[in-house]
Image (cartoon, rainbow, N blue to C red):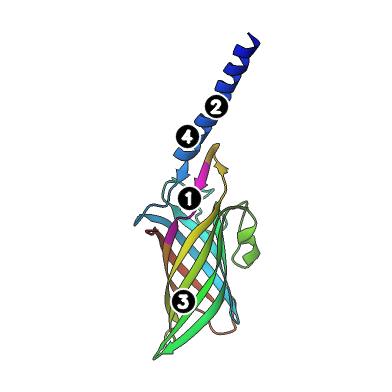
């Protein structure tokens, strides 16, 4: 009887693990090729070759709501924030354009806010739920100080988080997404260095 009981307990444990694994898979918010994933709003500060870009996600495909308020939707109520720390490795000038290439790391946080654009550190005060390697190209129009970017992130770490009592994982290890920003640079030396908004789309690995 003891042996039968041990076997039953083992089978029950295996069943729990299988069920947990299935639930986890069902609650992964996937990175799918050519699918719009995230919408981002942010600011950045440049200092020499260093660039810090920070802000919040105003939309995540797969989640109904990414704000803690149904009426106020900005950095103070954002549930998901991000910070990119990057370093410039190349600058090329071509007519009115300045082309800047950077590499770095992006972290997305489950925010415990509120965040405040006057305090960049407030965008990294939550729980890290996704980390990715980052490569960016910026094309700045030096006549208007407007710019567009394209950058690619490859996910290196994901952590389970809970939202409204449900466990999720944001993306999958090794998956990549491509982001395009439109932005406006500030007067040189002013803070922030500029503003941007953009959209991320799943890439083919």
**Closer to us: mark 3 or mark 4?**
4
The spot of residue 136 in percent (x, y) is 47, 72
Q: Label 4: state its secondary structure.
A: helix
Q: Which residue is mark 1?
A: 172
For label 4, the crowd category at 10 Å Cα-Cα, with few meaning under 14, some 14 to 19 and many 20 or more, is few
Q: Earlier in the sequence, mark 2 or mark 3?
A: 2
Measured Cα–Cα span from mark 1 to mark 3: 32 Å
Measured Cα–Cα span from mark 3 to mark 4: 44 Å
Q: Which residue is mark 2?
A: 14
Q: Which residue is mark 3?
A: 184
**Closer to us: mark 1 or mark 3?**
1
Q: Is 103 drawn above or below residue 186 in the view shown? A: above
Q: Is 63 drawn above or below residue 40 in the view shown? A: above
Measured Cα–Cα span from mark 4 to mark 1: 15 Å
Q: Label 1: state its secondary structure.
A: loop
45 and 12: which one is in front? Answer: 12
Q: Which residue is mark 4?
A: 22
Q: Residue furthest left?
A: 34
């Amino acid at each position: 009887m003891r042996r039968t009981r041990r076997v039953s307990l083992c089978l029950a444990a295996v069943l729990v693990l299988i069920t947990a694994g299935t639930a986890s898979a069902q609650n992964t918010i996937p990175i799918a090729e050519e699918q719009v994933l995230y919408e981002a709003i942010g600011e950045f500060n440049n200092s020499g070759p260093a660039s810090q870009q920070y802000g919040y996600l105003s939309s995540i495909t797969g989640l109904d709501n990414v704000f803690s308020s149904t009426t106020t939707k900005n950095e103070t109520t954002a549930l998901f924030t991000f910070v990119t720390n990057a370093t410039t490795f190349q600058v090329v000038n071509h007519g009115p354009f300045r082309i800047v290439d950077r590499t770095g790391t992006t972290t997305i946080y489950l925010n415990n806010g509120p965040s405040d654009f006057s305090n960049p550190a407030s965008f990294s005060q939550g729980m890290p739920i996704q980390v990715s390697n980052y490569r960016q190209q910026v094309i700045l129009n030096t006549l208007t100080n407007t710019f567009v970017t394209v950058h690619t992130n490859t996910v290196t770490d994901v952590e389970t988080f809970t939202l409204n009592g449900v466990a999720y994982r944001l993306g999958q290890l090794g998956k990549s997404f491509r982001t395009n920003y439109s932005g406006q640079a500030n007067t040189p030396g002013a803070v922030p260095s500029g503003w941007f908004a953009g959209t991320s789309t799943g890439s083919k690995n």
